[in-house]
Image: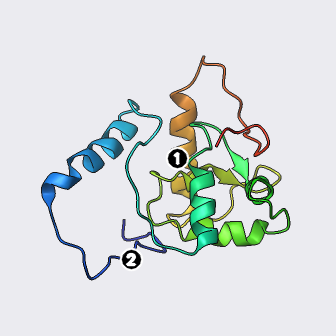
Amino acid sequence: MTEQRYGPQIGTDWVRDPGLFKEAERHPDAYFAQELRVFDLPLASRGTDFQRGVWQALTGVPYATTTSYGAIAADLGRPSASRAVGMANGRNPVSIVIPCHRVVGANGSLTGYGGGLPRKQRLLDMERRNTEGISSPRWSSAATRSP
């Protein structure tokens, strides 16, 4: 993904071990094959406490739904921090696994995405197509989302 605005930071202590990545490789493949809706991978994302809090909140946004930056800010107890949520969302080191593409503007418009708005729209469309006929709310509110 050369178009990705912010890539993950790789620590100097990192050692390549292909055996450890088998499950991490399987998850995105299954997601794009529309066989997986929730990623269940152990993550150790590096960021500030606030960023990690935002990223944790993003994992609670259900498949094929969207929420707003303001709703996440309110969920974190910082209702006036929607812009800070947007900045943390943009610094998400593992997009798709931590579904930052499910966050939209307060009016439902597509806003900011490190991989570009066309890619964000394609991901949301793919998820919605995969749930056609299944009762699922289009919007997720921080107040109704389970952590």
Above or below: residue 96 compared with residue 86:
above
Q: Nearer the viewer, mark 2 or mark 1?
A: 2
The answer to which image quadrant residue 79 occupies is bottom right
Q: Observer-nearest residue: 82 or 40?
A: 40
Considering every residue shown, the one lying at the far top of the view is 133
Which quadrant would the C terminus be assigned to in this image?
top right
Amino acid bearing label 2: Gln
Amino acid bearing label 1: Arg
Residue pointed to by mark 2 = 9
- Left or right: 68, with 43 as reference point: right
Considering every residue shown, the one lying at the far bottom of the view is 12
Above or below: residue 75 compared with residue 87:
above
Image coordinates for residue 117, horizontal then vertical, percent = 58, 59
Label 2 CA crowd tier, 10 Å (few <14, some 14–19, many 20+): few
Label for residue 56? none
Which quadrant would the N terminus be assigned to in this image?
bottom left
Label for residue 122? 1
The structure residue drawn at horizontal position 44% and vertical position 66%, both measured from the top left corner, is 45
- Left or right: 40, with 126 as reference point: left
Label 1 CA crowd tier, 10 Å (few <14, some 14–19, many 20+): few
Above or below: residue 32 compared with residue 114:
above
Image coordinates for residue 93, horizontal then vertical, percent = 45, 66
Helix, strand or loop at mark 2: loop
**CA distance for labels 2 and 1:** 26 Å
The answer to which image quadrant residue 65 occupies is top right
Among numbered discs 2 and 1, the one appearing first in the sequence:
2
The structure residue drawn at horizontal position 20% and vertical position 54%, both measured from the top left corner, is 20
The answer to which image quadrant residue 105 occupies is bottom right
Helix, strand or loop at mark 1: helix
Image coordinates for residue 73, horizontal then vertical, percent = 76, 60
Tag 2 near tag 1, CB within 8 Å: no
Q: How is the image coloured?
A: rainbow
